[in-house]
Image: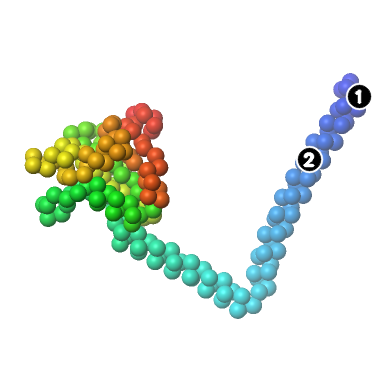
Amino acid sequence: MDLGFGNTNQTVGNAAANTLLRATQAQEAAIASEISKYDALLESNDSELEKRRERRLAQMKAAQSQKAKWLEAGHGVYSDLSSGGGGQQHDIAKAFFEAAKKSNRMVVHFHRPTTRQCDVFHAALEQLAPRHPETRFVKINVEGCDDVREGGSGVGAKYLVEKLGIVVMPTLLIVKDRKAHHQVRGFDELGGK
């Protein structure tokens, strides 16, 4: 059908048809490749299936072993680095660095009990920790940094706050491969609510 543009209409139509044809042929080739893989699987002998089964079983065992290592290192729970256990004070900075050495991924929540917005992060991180055993979730109470004599959070928290530039509560520190990767300060980055 000629709309008065001469051969231009036909040229555009042919180009569109050729493009659609090439895309359809590419999809058909991909589907044919997948079908041939399944056909080969159906025609394979028991030894090939057994090899596939053994490889998958080895993958599953390795994944389970890695998960067990993560759980042993404190992953899967939202733990408090501020509490020394047994009522004794301890060096929070040292605990932080030891945890970072044992974990490739870590989410650290710097909080104060008197800041109500921190409770939102507490609730969310409590739910996320068991779902992501590949990441260690910890919290550090920074109220009363280094004021050990008056019931402060313990030695070392002030060092971390100063070195990492923690100024807004709550702050989430994302540690990846033992390096501070990103900070989420307050709720502004999360929509400000």
Report the residue marked by disc 1.
Answer: 6
Q: Which residue is farthest left?
A: 149
Q: Where does the image place residue 10, in percent across and percent down from the top left? A: 88, 31
Residue wearing tag 2: 19
Residue positioned 24% across, 47% down in the render: 93
- 27 vs 145, left or right, is right
Asked whether the residues under the numbered discs 2 and 1 touch, taking CB atoms below 8 Å apart as contact, a structural biologist would say no
Between 28 and 48, which is closer to the camera in this rendering?
A: 48
Q: Quadrant of residue 167?
A: top left
Question: Visible in this render: residue 24?
Answer: yes
Mark 1 Cα shell of 10 Å, populated few (<14), some (14-19), many (≥20): few
The one nearer the camera, 147 or 143, is: 147
Q: CA distance from mark 2 to mark 1?
A: 21 Å
Image mark for residue 137:
none
Which residue is found at the position 15% from the left and 54% from the top?
85
Q: Quadrant of the C terminus?
A: top left
The residue type indicated by label 2 comes to: Thr
Q: Is residue 131 in sight in this rendering?
A: no
How is the rendered protein coloured?
rainbow
The image shows residue 128 at horizontal and vertical percentages of 34, 47
Q: Quadrant of the N terminus?
A: top right
Residue 14 x %, y %: 85, 36
Q: Is residue 181 above or below residue 7?
A: below
Element at label 2: helix
